[in-house]
Image: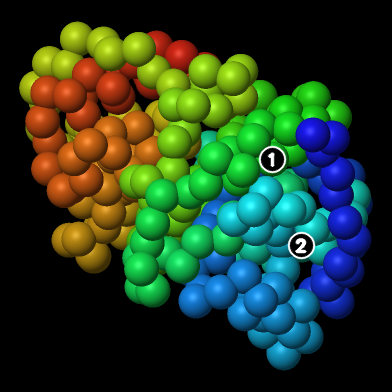
Amino acid sequence: MAFSIDEHPSPNVDDRPNGCTVDCLILHYTGMKSASAALDRLCDLDAKVSAHYLIDEDGHVLRLVDEHRRAWHAGISYWRGRERLNDCSIGIEIVNPGHEWGYRPFTEAQYRALEHLCSDIMVRWSIAPCRLLAHSDIAPDRKEDPGELFDWQRLANAGIGLWPKDGEGAWRPMDEVIRQLHEVGYSLPDPADWRAPRRRLLAFQRRYRPERVDGELDQETLARLDGLLAQTDPLE
């Protein structure tokens, strides 16, 4: 079946800052009861949210915002030293009710559409595999999407993004783990918020250790982190 994209422009858009280059692709779930409710919100001027693309459960893809313009999907965000990731990213919303409304596995049709769309975008903008991101990666204090049911390993097997080979997994204290998560790209936690370190570990587990998302250190989580560190360039 040919891959096609239909146009459904959102008014929630503005220009990217001068000189800002797209270098991130961010995946979300819609987190609403239905696809129509999500589309209405993404096109509601009062809501002040949008994304570049929306993928329905049947694999139907809508383009809401031209890639050269800034959509409003990332909010307060951080990755590898950069904030305000709306400026430099493309956002894809995947229809799913999310943790609040009956979280369920994503569909085969959605994955097939994502494989086409993500591959095209990453080639078109020369986006590095380490910059295919979850909303929870860039905003771990407030977001969970697309969550532990999203199959990142499948995308990596298709040549889209990263999936780490397990490393040694030696035990180390949480402070060192948080430092290493920051080396990967996650923001440093607010020292005044004792729950913030655990939220970063939860975000990592949702992405790379979905079999056990509990915010606790274990050998498998540490092994996946070691594997990811081995694939990560030092921060600039």
Residue at 82% in and 38% down: 3
CA neighbours of label 1 inside 10 A, class few (<14), some (14 to 19), many (20+): many
Q: Is residue 220 at all visible to an observer of this figure?
A: yes
Q: CA distance from mark 2 to mark 1?
A: 20 Å
* Image-quadrant location for residue 8: bottom right
* Image-quadrant location for residue 153: top left
Residue at 72% in and 68% down: 50
In this view, the residue in front, 26 or 236, is 26
The x and y percentages for residue 202 are 27, 48
Q: How was the colour assigned to the protein in this rendering? A: rainbow
Task: Classify residue 129 as left or right of residue 66.
Answer: left
Name of the residue lying farthest toward the front: 1
Residue at 64% in and 53% down: 58
Q: Which mark is residue 164?
A: none
Where 232 sits versus 108, above or below? above
The x and y percentages for residue 218 are 10, 30
Q: Which amino acid type is marked by label 1?
A: Ala
Q: Which amino acid type is marked by label 2?
A: Ala
Name of the residue lying farthest toward the bottom: 46
Q: Is residue 92 at all visible to an observer of this figure?
A: no
Task: Classify residue 24 as left or right of residue 222.
Answer: right
In this view, the residue in front, 86 or 205, is 205
The x and y percentages for residue 165 are 35, 12
Labels 2 & 1 near each other (Cβ < 8 A) = no
Identify the secondary structure beneath mark 2: strand
* Residue that mark 2 sits on: 71
Q: Which mark is residue 113?
A: 1
Count of marks overlaid on the render: 2
The x and y percentages for residue 18 are 90, 51
Q: Nearer the viewer, mark 2 or mark 1?
A: 1
